[in-house]
Image (spheres, grey):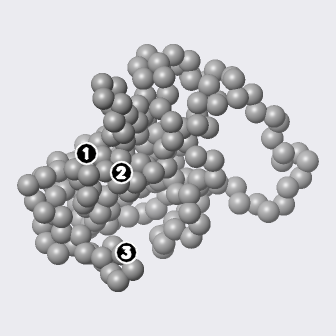
Amino acid sequence: LCGCFRQAGVPVDNAQDITDDSDSVTEEAIPPAIDYGAVIGKTEYDLITHDPKTQKYIFSAAQTNLGNLCADAYRSAALSDAAIVCAGEIGDSISCGDITVADVFATLPVGCNLITVHATGEEILCCLEAAYQYLPRGNSEFLHVSGVSAVLDMNQNPTVMTDDMGNFAGLSGDGRVRDVLIGGAPLQEDATY
């Protein structure tokens, strides 16, 4: 499982940061000036954070092509089974046409670290339950995913428990997330991904 996290000290016991945290900077290590206008891709569709008909912000309450593209990119870069991207980590939409370096910087925040973790199926299930507990109302913890599919039972009340500080403390029963697949195979709660 991989994801991009802005805050330092993400409480994950087995996190592996795949960025370079070297404190020593040499002249050779300074990258050349960035050409923000350079075209690095093309899209035939608008990559969205807003509903194209209503212009209502939907990114924090529904899967979108932009969120899934970002999650796909993270999963590919990390060579992981699955990837998650919090809605709060994505910025602007990308319009149909050429994609420039500036578009990527406007969409993905600078300063995030892509990390990989070994997570059990149970931990992934808990993560999904916590992320989708506020639906249908949006929230910045809503997850866009890659390599993961699930059915959400919106008739089921959320079962997420939190401690006095508001941190996840477990589930109090069967949750909303059902029929989870990782890479097309049923999630095994005791397996490690």
Q: What residue type is labelled 3?
A: Asn
The residue at the point 88 percent across, 45 percent down is 28
Q: Looking at the picture, how far across and down is residue 36, in whole percent? A: 70, 29
Q: Considering depth in this image, is 138 or 150 the residue closer to the camera?
A: 138
**Horizontal relation, residue 179 to residue 193: left or right:** left
**Which residue is at a point 19% across and 56% down the rendered structure image?**
177
Mark 3 or mark 2: name the one nearer the start of the chain.
Answer: 2
Q: What residue type is labelled 2?
A: Leu
Numbered disc in front, either 3 or 1: 3
Q: Is residue 152 above or below residue 22?
A: above
- Taking the spot 18% from the left edge, 64% from the top edge, the residue there is 158
Q: Which mark is residue 167?
A: 3
1 or 2: tag closer to the N-terminus: 2
Camera-nearest residue between 35 and 136: 136
At a point 48% along the width and 44% down the height, the residue shown is 90
Q: Residues within 10 Å of mark 1 (few under 14, many from 20)?
A: some
Mark 3 and mark 1 lie on one chain; the one further toward the N terminus is 1
Q: How far apart are marks 3 and 2 (CA)?
A: 17 Å
Residue 122, percent from left and from top: 27, 66
CA distance separating discs 3 and 1: 25 Å
- State the image quarter where residue 160 is shown: bottom left
Residue ID for mark 2: 143
Label pair 3/2, CB-CB below 8 angstroms = no
Name the element at disc 3. Answer: loop
Q: Is residue 90 shown to the viewer in this render?
A: yes
Q: Which residue type carries mark 1?
A: Ser
- The mark found on residue 149 in the picture is 1
Residue 125: image x %, image y %? 26, 61
72 versus 100 height, above or below: below
Secondary structure of residue under mark 2: strand
